Structure formats: structure tokens, C-alpha cells
Image: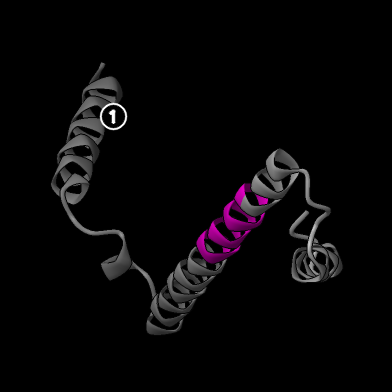
Amino acid sequence: MASLQASLESMKASEQSLKAELGTALLSTLSSDDQHEVDRLNDEIQELTATNRHALEERVKVCHLKIYCIYLGFPLTWKVMELERSWKNQNFI
């Protein structure tokens, strides 16, 4: 019975320490190298997100131009075809 009581007390102490830790920031528990790696990865994610957003905006522009040209009965201009070609090379399409 005494060992069970001691185990229960130990579990309660662990619970209290984990509850106290619950509100702390995770970055503060990382080493400085790990924190720098997280910062670098966050910067890379932001850069890739911006690149992706720009590519999507350009793709929408080309699609609108393509629809406009088709609506007017004109063949696609050289510039549109060139953009599509470059996008395929960059795997945007």
C-alpha cells in the first residue's frame, strides 16, 4: 500500500510539472542550433509561399488572356505560348 501511495504522489508531481510546462513556448526548449534551423525553415516556407502565390497569379493572368483570345477568335499570341512553355519547364503547369 505504501508503494502505491508513493507512486501516486510521484504521478501527481509529474502532472503538476507538466501542467506548469504546458504554457511555455516550444522554441525555448530547443537548442540554439535547433531554433536557428526552425527560423531558417520558416523563412524558406515564407519564400516558397510567396513564389507559389506569384506563380498562381501569373497562371491566372495567362488563363484569362487565353480565354479572351479564344472568345475573340484569335489564335494564342506568341507571348502566351512562350509563358506556357516556360511554366511547363518550371513544372507550374
Q: Quadrant of residue 4?
A: top left
Most distant residue in the top direction:
1
Of 72 and 4, the residue lying toward us? 72
Is residue 56 located in the magenta-colored stretch of the structure?
yes
Give x and y (percent) for residue 26.
30, 59
- Image position of 47 with respect to 73: above or below: below
Q: Residue at x 24, y 40 (%)?
A: 14
Give x and y (percent) for residue 47.
49, 73
Residue at mark 1: 7
Give x and y (percent) for residue 80.
75, 64
Q: Main secondary structure of the magenta part?
A: helix
Q: Left or right: 66 with respect to 84?
A: left
Q: Left or right: 62 with respect to 10?
A: right
Q: Quadrant of residue 88?
A: bottom right
Q: Left or right: 53 with respect to 26?
A: right
Of 63 and 31, the residue lying toward us? 63
Q: Residue at x 83, y 53 (%)?
A: 75
Q: Residue at x 59, y 62 (%)?
A: 58
Give x and y (percent) for residue 40.
47, 79
- Image position of 28 with respect to 33: above or below: above
Q: Residue at x 31, y 66 (%)?
A: 27
Is residue 61 located in the magenta-colored stretch of the structure?
yes
**Numbered range of the magenta stretch:** 52-64
Label 1 neighbourhood size at 10 Å, few (<14), some (14-19), many (20+)? Answer: few
Of 46 and 59, the residue lying toward us? 59
Of 66 and 57, the residue lying toward us? 66
Looking at the rendering, in which quadrant would you find the N terminus?
A: top left
> What SS does tag 1 mark?
helix
